[in-house]
Image (cartoon, grey):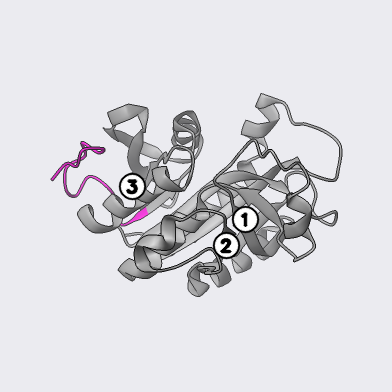
Amino acid sequence: MPTPHNEAKKGEIAKVVLMPGDPNRAKWIVENFLHDVKLVNKVRGQFCFTGLTKNNKRISVMSHGMGNPSIGIYSFELFTEYDVDVIIRVGTCGSYQDFVNFFDVIIGESTCTDSNYGAQLGHDVSYCPKASSELVETAKEVLTKKGYPFHVGMVFAADVFYDFKKDIWKEYAKRGVLAVEMESYALYVNAEYLGKKALTMLTVTDHFIKEGRLTPEQRQTGLRNMIDSAIEVAEKYAE
């Protein structure tokens, strides 16, 4: 049945869901990569579409908003109320490492945070949940086959976008953290707790070392490699 945040009926959301943060990005994904699409949720402007891939595999695409609390709500409801088995977050990030380039894809094998989202389960910020190892391996295989540049490692799921401590990122960088985003932690905590599969795939659109800033158009079209790969990963688990 519908939830306070999702008006979709049971069965209208597929077992595998791609989750970008931006509702407009969700629309862009389905317009460019899916067919026979149906809009099944628009509550609070967070769109959820269900459609078919080019290989006629049924998947859903739903936006999750910004931050751990937001994706925490939507992913929890998808896992528990809509029987979703797999969630693949497809987002953007800012890289901390000089060997990572703009537009590279990052697979978030694990995530650290400054969030207290995990405190409800007795976790403190030293707890670093992991992605599904199966999904990580599948994503690596797909990206390698396609020849898209990618990196695998830990990402930082920050609760703060405008950090008053301007150089705090250097502490994460020297510990090998690849990039910063804002949602992987809550997604992985939920998936681990509920026995589901989750993965975060990110495109580098910002950089803490290299100069440059992408245009809005580049941020949109530059995601094609990641989305193309994420959909192929999703197809392996979709009906």
Is residue 217 rendered to the left or right of residue 209? left
- Residue 141 in the magenta stretch? The answer is no
Q: Earlier in the sequence, mark 2 or mark 3?
A: 3
Against 127, residue 159 (above or below) is above
Q: Left of 194 or right of it: where is 88?
A: right
Q: Amino acid at mark 3?
A: Ile
Image height check: is 145 above or below 116? below
Q: Main secondary structure of the magenta part?
A: loop
Reading the image, the residue beneath label 3 is 73
Measuring from the top left, give residue 70's x and y in whole percent.
40, 42
At horizontal 76% and vertical 58% (from top left) the residue drawn is 171
Q: CA distance from mark 1 to mark 3?
A: 20 Å
Q: Which residue is mark 1?
A: 156
Across and down, in percent, residue 189 comes to 42, 63
Distance between mark 2 and mark 1 Cα atoms: 6 Å
Expressed as whole percent of the image width and height from the top left, the position of residue 119 reads 41, 61
Going 13% across and 45% down the picture, which residue do you hit? 1
Mark 2 sits on what residue?
111
Label 3, secondary structure: give it: helix
On the question of residue 71 being in view, the answer is: yes
Give the mark count. Answer: 3
Q: Residues in magenta?
A: 1-16
Q: Which residue type does callout 2 highlight?
A: Thr
Distance, label 2 to label 3, CA atoms, is 18 Å
Q: Are marks 2 and 1 in contact (CB under 8 Å)?
A: yes
